[in-house]
Image (cartoon, rainbow, N blue to C red):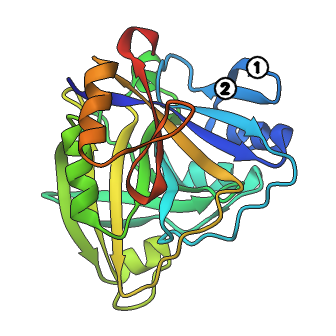
Amino acid sequence: MTLLGIREAVVATADLPAAVAFLRRAFGFEVVEETDGGALLAAAGAPAGRLRLIAQPGAVPQDAAVWDLGVRLLGIYSRDLEQTVEAIESAGGASRRPVSYPYGAATLSELVGYGRDGVWWTVPQAVTGAHRPSDAYAADPQRLHSELHSVVLVVDDHDDAVAFFEAGGLGTVFDGTMAGSEFEELVGMPAGAELRLTFMGGPEHRPARLEIMSFTGVAGQRTDAGGGVQRIVYFCDDVAATREALIAAGAEQADDGTLRGPAGLEIALVQEENR
């Protein structure tokens, strides 16, 4: 029994055509399914790591900071960060400059940008042979951006959130505290603040993966859920057993069958063959 990877992130948007246009221009996503009031976007060749947009006219998410609680960022790999800056800005978003910093025994280059609907983006440089699995890159090694690489959940009780997802079968790939000028520049946090990051994945580290973040030295707040990321859809090898394990770990059950986890995160579970 285990969570395997995030099939899609569900995002509410006040302007569906504009949100679709941003994702296509900034990251090369394409519409693979249209519904009444929504659209599913994917990177070519990727059965997971997708984005489902839900039209929510009039929804105006609060101007959330990176360190506010909830799903605050979505992660995507880039082959060339300077090209990514140009792509985000030409699509109408904003980007902080790329920063390089120690990551375990390696060095990672990354940028953080802002798109639409209260969603921030964390974009690490994809180093050939060193990045986590990506079906989009496997299908097209010359592609600039991958499918969703990760979903980032900001919490106030870090250890509790890690334990929750461990109960669902995820393992910790990396866990560390990050501080200093590089990280202050990367995410815009004030001097002296720190962030803790736990990177988690299923047995094969399939995309999209989960990052849990918490901050000290800067006050996060719970923002209105009127827009932005509403839920994540996880594929797993046994829906019933995974659901029971997450409920035993503290998940709340919603009327529509979804679960509510740390920081109010909505989680839907689907069987692996339906991913």
Circle count: 2
Tell me which residue sits at (61%, 69%) in the image.
64
Q: Residue 146 at x, y = what percent?
A: 48, 34
Horizontal placement of 50 versus 99: left or right?
A: right
Placement of 269 over or under 159, stated as above or below: above
Q: Quadrant of the N terminus?
A: top left
Residue underneath mark 1: 34
Horizontal placement of 215 versus 274: left or right?
A: left
The reply to whether residue 81 is in sight is yes
**Disc 2/disc 1 C-alpha distance (Å):** 6 Å
Is mark 2 in CB contact (under 8 Å) with mark 1? yes
Q: Residue 62 at x, y = what percent?
A: 70, 68
Tell me which residue sits at (47%, 72%) in the image.
67
Given the current orientation, which residue lies at the most extreme front position? Answer: 255
Given the current orientation, which residue lies at the most extreme top position? Answer: 273
Which amino acid type is marked by label 1?
Glu
In terms of depth relative to the viewer, which is nearer, 60 or 180? 60
Q: Residue 165 at x, y = what percent?
A: 26, 44
Tell me which residue sits at (82%, 39%) in the image.
16
Placement of 3 over or under 70, stated as above or below: above
Placement of 120 over or under 217, stated as above or below: above
In terms of depth relative to the viewer, which is nearer, 135 or 213? 213
Horizontal placement of 72 versus 244: left or right?
A: right
Which amino acid type is marked by label 2?
Leu
Of labels 2 and 1, earlier in sequence is 1
Residue underneath mark 2: 40
